[in-house]
Image: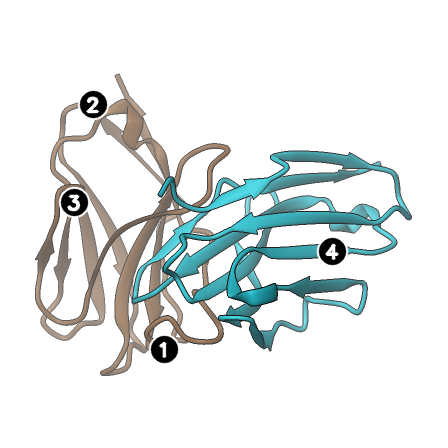
Chain colours: A brown, B cyan
Amino acid sequence: DAKTTQPNSMESNEEEPVHLPCNHSTISGTDYIHWYRQLPSQGPEYVIHGLTSNVNNRMASLAIAEDRKSSTLILHRATLRDAAVYYCILDNSGGGADGLTFGKGTHLIIQP
Amino acid sequence: DTGVSQDPRHKITKRGQNVTFRCDPISEHNRLYWYRQTLGQGPEFLTYFQNEAQLEKSRLLSDRFSAERPKGSFSTLEIQRTEQGDSAMYLCASSSDVSYTFGSGTRLTVV
């Protein structure tokens, strides 16, 4: 799977929007962009995924650049419970044999 | 369905002992994965089952590690002759489509 690049950490204030960037310049046409987050002492949790168009769900929005070489996860109004490590992952196997390839992710800190 | 369950949550064992972890996936999910996660790193893929068949193994899965998924339901991961380097969080995930549901993991400490 192609590689992604994320900042090691970001800090935001409670009740403000958060924009988490991800670069994936070597993305292929069949790569889906997935976001998972991991709260302390828990397993990763699915957040959102997309291919070309922007996506919204109850947890977040995913904005995908027109050339697909970058994307941004948007948390519209951060709460303290959103403090976690956020992973941006490319996956073209549709849930295939080698699973997801995680990087180190972005450690999101939320200040009250 | 309460999601993916893993047991035990924590395990402390002496070096050289064998340990076995269990994962109960979401019942309708035919794909099951095991991952290992060390402090400060993202999860690393270990092995994959489609139903009862183990279809993929990472090079991280040494011959001391074995995994099974009898009847395509729950899965077990056994580590024989544990070493201190095996200390990590072992995560199980299941899937039936493009998203994965992870368990809370089993934290192994080898002393």
**Which three-letter amino acid code belongs to the residue tagged 3?**
Ala
Q: Quadrant of the C terminus of chain B?
A: top right
| Numbered disc 3: secondary structure | loop
User: As rendered, which of A38 and A73 lies closer to the eye?
Assistant: A38
**Which three-letter amino acid code belongs to the residue tagged 2?**
Glu
- The residue at the far top in this view is A112
- Residue assigned mark 1: A93
Q: Is residue A87 left or right of residue B80?
A: left
Query: In this rendering, do the residues under marks 1 and 2 share a single chain?
Result: yes
User: As rendered, which of B65 and A61 lies closer to the eye?
Assistant: B65
Asked whether the residues under the numbered discs 1 and 4 touch, taking CB atoms below 8 Å apart as contact, a structural biologist would say no
Residue B42 visible here: no
The subunit letter for the residue under badge 3 reads A
Q: Where B76 falls versus B62 (above or below)? A: above
**Which three-letter amino acid code belongs to the residue tagged 1?**
Ser
- Residue assigned mark 2: A14
- Residue assigned mark 4: B78
Query: In this rendering, do the residues under marks 3 and 1 share a single chain?
Result: yes
Q: CA distance from mark 3 to mark 1?
A: 23 Å
- Residue assigned mark 3: A60
| Numbered disc 2: secondary structure | loop
Asked whether the residues under the numbered discs 3 and 2 touch, taking CB atoms below 8 Å apart as contact, a structural biologist would say no
Front: mark 4 or 2 = 4
Q: Please provide percent x and percent y for residue B8.
A: 64, 37
Q: CA distance from mark 4 to mark 2?
A: 43 Å
Q: CA distance from mark 3 to mark 2?
A: 15 Å
Q: Quadrant of residue B63?
A: bottom right
The subunit letter for the residue under badge 1 reads A
